[in-house]
Amino acid sequence: MALYGGIEAGGTKFVCAFGTNPEDLRDKYRFETTTPSKTLDKLIRYFKEQNKKEKLSAIGIGSFGPLDLDKKSSTYGYITSTPKIEWQNTKIYGRIKEAFAVPVGFDTDVNAAALGEHEWGAARDVSDFIYITIGTGIGGGGMFNGDFLHGLLHPEMGHIFIPHDKKVDPYEGICPFHKNCFEGLASGVAIKDRWGKAGEKLRIDHPAWDLEVNYISLAVINYICTLSPERIILGGGVMKQKHMLPRIHKRVKKLLNDYIQAPEITDNIEKYIVLPELGDDSGVLGAIALAKREYERNNRTQMNVYNEKKS
Amino acid sequence: MALYGGIEAGGTKFVCAFGTNPEDLRDKYRFETTTPSKTLDKLIRYFKEQNKKEKLSAIGIGSFGPLDLDKKSSTYGYITSTPKIEWQNTKIYGRIKEAFAVPVGFDTDVNAAALGEHEWGAARDVSDFIYITIGTGIGGGGMFNGDFLHGLLHPEMGHIFIPHDKKVDPYEGICPFHKNCFEGLASGVAIKDRWGKAGEKLRIDHPAWDLEVNYISLAVINYICTLSPERIILGGGVMKQKHMLPRIHKRVKKLLNDYIQAPEITDNIEKYIVLPELGDDSGVLGAIALAKREYERNNRTQMNVYNEKKS
């Protein structure tokens, strides 16, 4: 049976694991992100050792970005214009591909998490959906008509512009590119910068949460009107605040004002906007799902070549 | 050779035509939208007569909405919650299907227009793209991974929320559902309501156009960040103002601030955000493209059934 390696490549930590699914996650290796060469050497050593014991069939990488995902590009599989200066223009897919002679799946961290939720979690029963993470930063990915949205590059859903009433919230926003885009107003970093305290330390009745509910709801409505998804999964540190989700349900319904006539929203919003089901492993499980998908694709291609030769 | 009928079903007018492509549009019949039964009777009579002379192979309908596009629904092909009271819950696809024993393609007016641009116009060379119309109302459609976005329903791109600085623009917005959503602030109806004059009558240096450029650019950025399209087509009456497009290019670049590192945007935005190429026929040609697609799908399905029986 095929065994997969997964790499959750984050700006502050890397998580590596191998296994086949959430019930069979055989090991987890977590370490701090340092320089590209040290970090990549470390993870390659980890999988090399593993590979000696039990052979990996494929590896998946869900990475922080932005990424070059254009397979015709000479820098395919690179991290590109990240604000983490040292990591700009880092070859990541290529390093792994060279080190292991197996199929390697590569995509954004949020697309990987979305795929994991589709394979084993909150999006098992739908095909067109998005996964948004609201943590230190804000990002989103998802699948439509059977694949990720890779037309130009990949979605950067955290950077949409939403209404910002400065009378209610005079905070300027912290996105280095856009100041008060969604991420600039509602990310964990923005909460900490605005209130001088991390979200985890703010009481449930702190005014921070009213703002947060409003901004997240506005963004969710924009995704609904633009993508018409069958489900929206909201993950990340901010969504660990248990009071948030029911308040977002209410606010989205109020702001949408019954415009979208779909019972999924008008009658069952609790099943429409949901939390992820894979918990803290969603990142690395998503990477394992990427590995699985790449492995299966590869097999299908080989099967087609075989069938063509036969006929 | 297959001959197609196209129906552009609009809230104020219907346009019917038949032909095979933009160079072969054999007739056009345009009439005012009245009651559902009178309007549909009229167009059925038109195609019945045509059908006697030369047989139609398929018909396509691009309709105002919202629509029920769920093929498993008992009201598939109905216009649903439109503000045009008389037209609420109107069976449209079913009426045409019953009257003509041919394949019938049915979708939103904007998805139809998008498909037409993909087949013969400004999106010929890309596969993932959107078409936005900014006219009396604002709507958007498009294709991703080979199909429209039909996860839940269909996109309602005009109803996203964008920043609205009331110090610069104290106008409240005219959307009956959301007041100051994109459509509520930037549609033709909003322009007329805000300034007391239709857009066509406002001079090129009227402050209306600065607002318009800004709102359209903000919406375009939200679509880019959410969908990552390969191209954006901006149509509709407002975009007939020739000064608009170059100003939108500039504003989008300024607001995006080089965050999306794709040469299509950073170096060639003139080819990234473009006008439609099918002009005033884009609606009915889109409907003909829907007919063509449905006809070809139908043939493929029949071919598969035939091959299965054979083997």
Image (cartoon, coloured by chain):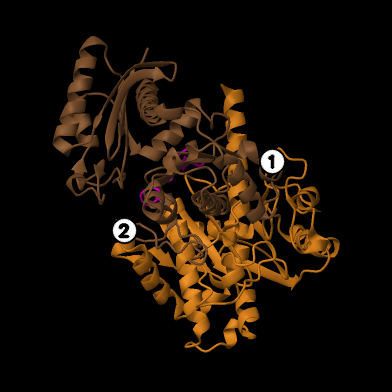
Chain colours: A orange, B brown
Q: Mark 2: which amino acid? A: Pro
Q: Which sits in the foreground, B42 or B287? A: B42
Vertically, is B245 above or below A33?
above
Residue under disc 2 on the same chain as residue under disc 1: no
In the rendering, which numbered label is found on residue B176? Answer: 2
Q: Mainly helix, strand or loop, the magenta region?
A: loop
Q: Residues within 10 Å of mark 2 (few under 14, many from 20)?
A: few
* Residue A18 figure quarter: bottom right
Mark nearest the camera among 2 and 1 is: 2
Vertically, is A248 above or below A208?
above
Q: Which sits in the foreground, B148 or A99? A: B148
* SS of the residue under disc 2: loop
Q: Is residue A175 visible?
A: yes
Which residue is at 56% across, 72% downward?
Answer: A186
The magenta span reads: B142-156
Query: Which x, y percent locates residue A89?
Result: 80, 53
Which residue is at 61% across, 50% downward?
Answer: B252
Q: Mark 1: which amino acid? A: Lys
* SS of the residue under disc 1: loop
Which residue is at 24% across, 35% downward?
Answer: B93
In the rendering, which numbered label is found on residue A71? Answer: 1
Query: Which x, y percent locates residue B152?
Result: 37, 52
Number of on-image labels:
2
Q: Chain of mark 1?
A: A
Whether residue A130 sits left or right of residue A304 in the image: it is: left
Q: Is-magenta flag for residue B45?
A: no
Query: Which x, y percent locates residue B108?
Result: 35, 40
* Residue A53 figure quarter: bottom right
Q: Chain of mark 2?
A: B
Q: Is-magenta flag for residue B143?
A: yes
